[in-house]
Image (tube, rainbow, N blue to C red):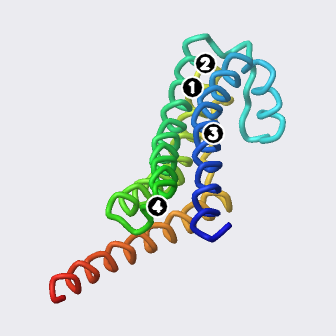
Amino acid sequence: MNNIARIKTISRLMEHFCLIVMIALPMWVIWFWTNADQYLAELSFARESLLLDMQYIELYQLVLAGGLSMLSILVLVYGISHLRRLFVLFQQGEFFSEHSARHLHIFGLTLFISALLKPVVSAALSLILTMGNPPGQKSVVVEFGSREISMIFIAGTILVITWILREGQKLAAENAEFV
């Protein structure tokens, strides 16, 4: 099996994996928020600054929190859908086209946006989930750590690679005109 055939085979597997992730991420969010009473207590215990008590959390707060979580996940799912399209192009042997560069660019951009959304979403979630707490027990928790920094680094790397691919495409088009 030559390298092109291997790339096409692995791209087919990655396309299927992307589809699984695109389905699993929203399903996980739905599952988490429908079982919130179990997991919010553990989350509160793990982060002593976040005082979550189910007796103070109303159904509308869970719905708001679930909706906000779903919006941030859907940004990532949108990016993964473009990554999936990229793997479809690779299966067709389209490696260095404008279409492949565009799909890779959108994936990198959504990773970047997702990493930047994390502290905003975490602050909003903590505010939503503690707004029914008694005075002095409300919390705003902002999370931004190594996971988000790593995601920004990977997204930046992907965006630079995409930029280089697009510049290479321009050079190839200019060279083709001279021949």
Question: Which residue lies under the disc numbered 2?
Answer: 62
Q: Tag 3: residue type?
A: Val
Q: CA distance from mark 1 to mark 4?
A: 43 Å
Which residue is denoted by mark 4 in the rendering?
Answer: 93
Q: Quadrant of residue 109?
A: bottom left
Q: Quadrant of residue 95?
A: bottom left
Q: Residue at x 64, y 70 (%)?
A: 2
Q: Cα distance, mark 2 to mark 3? A: 24 Å
The mark lying in front, picked from 2 and 4, is: 4
Residue 161: image location, x then y, percent: 45, 73
Q: Secondary structure at mark 4?
A: loop
Task: Tell me the amino acid under the disc marked 1.
Answer: Ala
Question: Where is the C terminus found, in terms of image quarters?
Answer: bottom left
Q: Which residue is mark 3?
A: 21
Q: Amino acid at mark 4?
A: Gly
Residue 146 horizontal/vertical position (percent)? 68, 62
Q: Nearer the viewer, mark 1 or mark 4?
A: 4
Nearer the camera: disc 4 or disc 3: 4
Q: Is residue 45 left or right of residue 18?
A: right
Q: Nearer the viewer, mark 1 or mark 3?
A: 3
Q: Of the residues under marks 2 and 4, which one precedes in the sequence?
A: 2
What is the spatial separation of the Cα atoms under label 4 and label 3, in whole angstroms?
24 Å
Question: Residue drawn at (57%, 46%), measured in percent from left and top?
Answer: 15
- Mark 1 or 3, nearer chain start: 3
Residue in view at x 16 percent, y 83 percent: 177
Chain-order first, disc 1 or disc 4:
1
* Dot 4 or dot 3, earlier in sequence: 3
